[in-house]
Image (tube, rainbow, N blue to C red):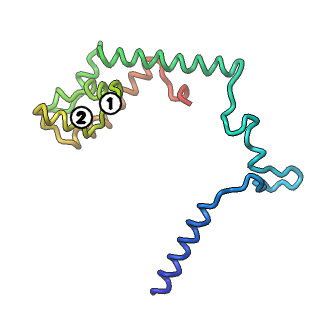
Amino acid sequence: MIWINGYLNYRIKDLYRQSGRESSLDVIINDDNENPLTLLDKISETGFQPPKLSGLDAYLEEQRKENILSIWQKFELYVKEDPQKLLRNCHPKKYPDCNCQLLAKKLFLKDPPETLAQIHRELQNLGLSIPDQTLRSHCKKKCLPLLQKILEDLGYSKEEES
């Protein structure tokens, strides 16, 4: 049994050594004998810098960024004002002060954002004895889906992100 453990220990060390090796840029990475391809061939003409967009691609990328920024600004305003009171009315039973508006402001609009643990401690200090797990599950199951729906209603789609 001892020899098996020793053997496995050395096999694991060998695997770590193999994964730590650096790859040569001249090593052929495809099986095509007529047109061999190396890592050096795959590096773009701009070297290690990512290629720059130009022309129509650059314009479309700029429009996409402006659209996302516009949606984010509308989202910030919506969270602060909560015109339909959707965020203020979404809270765990017995804890109306721990609503989605408060959580969204602290998690997404504050710079730097607070963590749920910090928010929980702050609520405890204010005398609100909400259990940590209740806060976390409310945030995950109620607040985040509601905030996602609000973002979608404001025009955001996940396809714009990528």
Disc 2, SS = helix
Where is mark 2, residue-wise? 119
Residue 136 horizontal side relative to residue 127, left or right: right
Residue at image mark 1: 107
**Image height of 35 relative to 139, above or below:** below
Give how far apart the Cα atoms at labels 2 and 1 are: 9 Å
Q: Is residue 123 above or below residue 54?
A: below
Q: Residue at x 12, y 31 (%)?
A: 126
- Residue 160: name its quadrant: top right
Q: What number is the disc on residue 153?
A: none
Q: Quadrant of the N terminus?
A: bottom left
Query: How many labels, in total?
Result: 2
Q: Is residue 68 left or right of residue 151?
A: right
- The amino acid type of the residue labelled 2 equals Ile
Q: Secondary structure at mark 1?
A: helix
Q: Residue at x 30, y 33 (%)?
A: 114
Q: Amino acid at mark 1?
A: Leu
Mark 1 packing: few (<14 Cα in 10 Å), some, or many (20+)? some
Is there a contact, CB below 8 Å, between mark 2 and mark 1? yes
**Depth check, front residue: 127 or 24:** 24
Residue 110 position within the rendered picture, expressed as x and y whole percent measured from the top left: 32, 26
